[in-house]
Image (cartoon, rainbow, N blue to C red):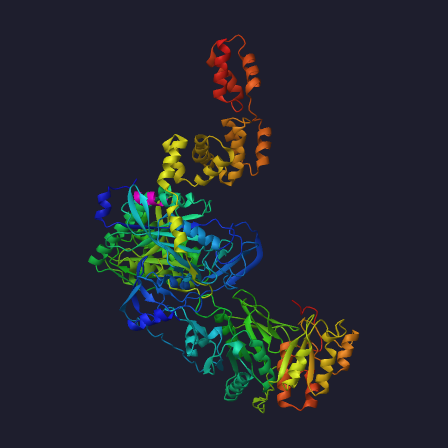
Amino acid sequence: MYSKEIEELLAKKSISIGDKVKVNSNRSEFTGRLMPRPEIGDNSILVIKLDNGYNIGMKFGEGFDIEKISGVPKQEKQKVRVKASKDLPKIGLIYTGGTIGSKIDYLTGGVFMLTKPEELLSEVPELAGIANIEVDNLMSIASEDMTYVEWQKIAKAVADTLNSGSRGVVITHGTDTMHYSSAALSFMLKNLNAPVIITGSQRSSDRGSSDAFLNLICSAHLAAKSDMAEVAICMHESPSDTYCSAIRGTKARKMHTSRRDAFKPINNRPIARVDSSGSIEYESDYKKASKDPEQKKVEVISGFEPKVALIKTYPNSDPGIIDYYMSKGYKGIILEGTGLGHTPVSTSNKNLSWLGSVKKAIDSGLIVGMTSQCLYGRVNKNVYRNLRLLSNAGVVYCEDMLPEVAYVKLGFLLGNFKKEQVSHLLNENIAGEITPRTEIDWFI
Amino acid sequence: MSVHEKDYYKKIGFKCGLEVHQRLLTKSKLFCSCSALLNGPQASIQIERRQRAVVGELGKLDASTSFESERGRKFIYNTFKGTACLVDVDEEPPHAVNTEALDIALLISASFAAEIPDEVEPMRKEVVDGSDPSAFQRTMLIGYNGHVSVNGKKIKISSLFLEEESSGIEESGKDKVVYNVDRLGIPLIEIDTDPDIETPQEAKEAAQRIGAILRLTGKVQRGIGSIRQDVNISIKGGTRTEIKGFQELESMDLIIDSEVQRQENLIKITGMLKERHAEVGMPVDVTKIFEGTAIKIISENISVNGAVFASKLSGFKGIIGMEINPNRRLGSEISDYAKTAGVKGIIHSDENLDSYGFSQSEISRIVQVLGIKEGDAFMLVAGEKSMAEKAINLAIYRAKLSLEGVPPETRAADSKTMSTKFLRPLPGGSRMYPETDANPILLDAKKYDILVKNAPDIDKVASDLRDKIGNPQIADQLLKSTKLQSFFNIIKDSNANPALVATILVEKMKELKRLGINTDSISDEVLSCVFSRYKARIITKSGIEEVIKAVPQECSDVDSIIEEKKLVRISGDELIALIKEEAKGLNDKSIIINRIMSKHRLNIDGEELGELVNVMLRK
């Protein structure tokens, strides 16, 4: 937004963004197109796109004048052609938003969400040769804004798509919370008998170097061909555009803010690596789709208890946070403890010991689960005295489950099961989130 | 000198503008904290990427974009320690703009008396050749409406851009291109003139002048590749072509003249083809005709899954073989396009087909299959099937362009043949859009006005140099050369005689370089040490050359070279003693001097010897 004075002047002269204008200031004169003001910086600077494509900023002030020359140029609409081939397997593409679904407006430079997912397909024509793709424009939400309500909607869309004949599903999703959604879907989809592949991109698909192209192609191959009956995240395996990794939905984590290969399996190995030609190389055991014609339809167990907190403990951390959540009526807490699953217990300052608050929470009926901020490895309640104290207080030790996954799982369990079942199910494997053993090479 | 008189260029509608690219001397890159000095060792990680042509705003692919995607090459990026980070390989958003680079860019804008915007807006300029892993280059307009004076004429500098250097190319093949990303992101200034330049000679002089003004700031990188000039040329009836890669400015005018000749001939050819209603045919697979052929150049190329494709060129007879530059024909131009697909070239019917070993029946079958009539020509390519098919389509594309005139191309200057060579189609107006990951930068107009006021006056520098050096020719050469900054550094550090330093820098070191001695690797600091030793009377003038020949890299090397090569100067009492001994029984001064110099040429200063001999023999 421009300053009030500029907006007024523009309104007076009926000039709008994108118009060709002539601008005079004390220093110089330019013709070009009026651009929107970026949200940052001095809003009294007018941004003009010159004929050579460059933008230039001119300060509004004394002696400043602007005249309209012509209006916004007509932009030819992109032709969207997605030919469906009936011989190819049918898959669903559920579009939820995120970088992979965003595009730049080259005129103004603004990034906007694609409203027509077909546009995405038109930019990746290879997809039409892999599968007969049915697009579901479900929502357009940045992943940081996702909540359990969206997880429920996505789970339902997946079940509908599969139950109406698709042999697999690709979900495009923002990357930030992709691993929360993948965990949620892993728990919510009952009788899943097909690949559900979540993908996204770390570089927007308007640039020639975007990772979206390979990610989408590999995901489509998995959905169209794989006999996996699991939810998996499929993104770049390395910074190169050579392979993608399919990572189990309950064992994936975004481990880098910006790299293409940000998603890594933790306490697990990727299920498969895929390349753009569609060759799939399985790297570990996975749940295979059953060919039983009596196979049950996919069901969504959609309950979710939002009053669950994920709390990190650290030196000097105040256990009062537990009291706060109790007072707010929370029903469960996942602790992201240190090391094997510690919270401060025998601190010199008694007020910083978590034991009392944890005990109080459990006694009042909350489920408290323990995970580790180490991420890699398994928590253990027996090695140290402090661990035993917590465990005796009733904390559930969540094995090698990721803290975020344990959080999602606890919300899921509390939303669908009785409390007695919940504390029992929390550290029992449901959807690959807990492995009984840890291979030696499952580490960084 | 230009080949023709000035009027001639006016008559043919010669239009010429320069784009000078100069790396700035900064500690770090433009949008990250990597070293900008290309001094990091290569790292083991290589990154492989594919880039795709993203359809433009109007839903169309640009000629150069589709040309590159037609080639479908993969890009490999070599990474480096210290000089490349995640930003360079498009794995991290850019950091804040380097203010040191910004200050230098403003200083340079001021040196060309340019105006600056109130606010600089970082942009992304789409790049399709893979030289940028992000598929765009970050660039910003930093100045406009400047000028450079050449022989009293003001040539307008329309724009100055501060931008990221591209990756260095390590290897370019038909399937892949290997780039080094250590160079990527080094701050670069691009200086564009208007197409006001009237002769090839003026283009050369303008380029030299711009280079001199840049070096005068003392804030630009020196050494191979740190400054590059692109020349845009067109003549009446033609199209703009861009010439890149001038190895040295000395031959720029000759290469421009050769390009003028090429464009004149291409326009002539178009006229002839139009008169003949010439046409270019479709690709035809003629592999069958060459089964078991005796033509080596074909049989060799089709032995494994190969194919031969041909195309009819109606009305091209005699024209495809017309010379457009010495030893270059229209056929060579067509061949250049085909070669980018990986084939060795094309064969066309204006060539002596017998010399290739074509049999009469092969020729008559081609004539039959293609339907060749009087006045028609044909061309063919042989190679692995998909490659040959790609190649014939590219050849057809170029042959069709000859019906239109001069194809808009980016061409390379070749200083061996003194001509230009096809590189790729000229990109259309590159698509640009805002770099939303970097903030706009407000500039301080008052501070800039002071910079303009205090900008170095190159004419004053030139006249000062002439005064200081005494020899106007050497002084002017120094001003044009890349050694100007070295000169100032050495004079300041060693306090040596300016004329001597200038002569050694612009003449002696060039001479030694021609002999294959890498004099460019000697730093100013080390050169200052050499001249200090001379100033301190430790070595003679001749000794300076000897030390430089040994290419010292450190000041301590200078001293050990002096010792090893026995270059210590003989002077004063020691020289008097030597004269006494050599002069025994002799009276002729010149004989004495010659005798001494022949034995101790490197160790004795001729002037001192002359004076002493004069004084001593007078007694």
| Quarter occupied by the N terminus of chain A | bottom left
Instruction: Residue at 57% x, 69% y: name it.
Output: A262
Tell which residue pokes out farthest to the left in this image.
B275
Q: Nearer the viewer, residue A350 or A266?
A: A350
Q: Nearer the viewer, residue B49 or B338?
A: B49
A263 vs A391: above or below: above
B472 to the left or right of B405: right
Q: Nearer the viewer, residue B124 or A277?
A: B124
Q: Which residues are magenta?
A: B201-207
Q: Nearer the viewer, residue A364 or B179?
A: A364
Type of secondary structure dominating the magenta stretch: helix
**Residue A243 lies in quadrant:** bottom right
- Measuring from the top left, give residue B98's x and y in whole percent: 48, 56
- Measuring from the top left, give residue A111's x and y in whole percent: 43, 71
B203 is within the stretch colored magenta: yes
**Residue B478 lies in quadrant:** top left
- Measuring from the top left, give residue A443's x and y in whole percent: 67, 68
A312 is within the stretch colored magenta: no
Total labels: the figure holds: 0
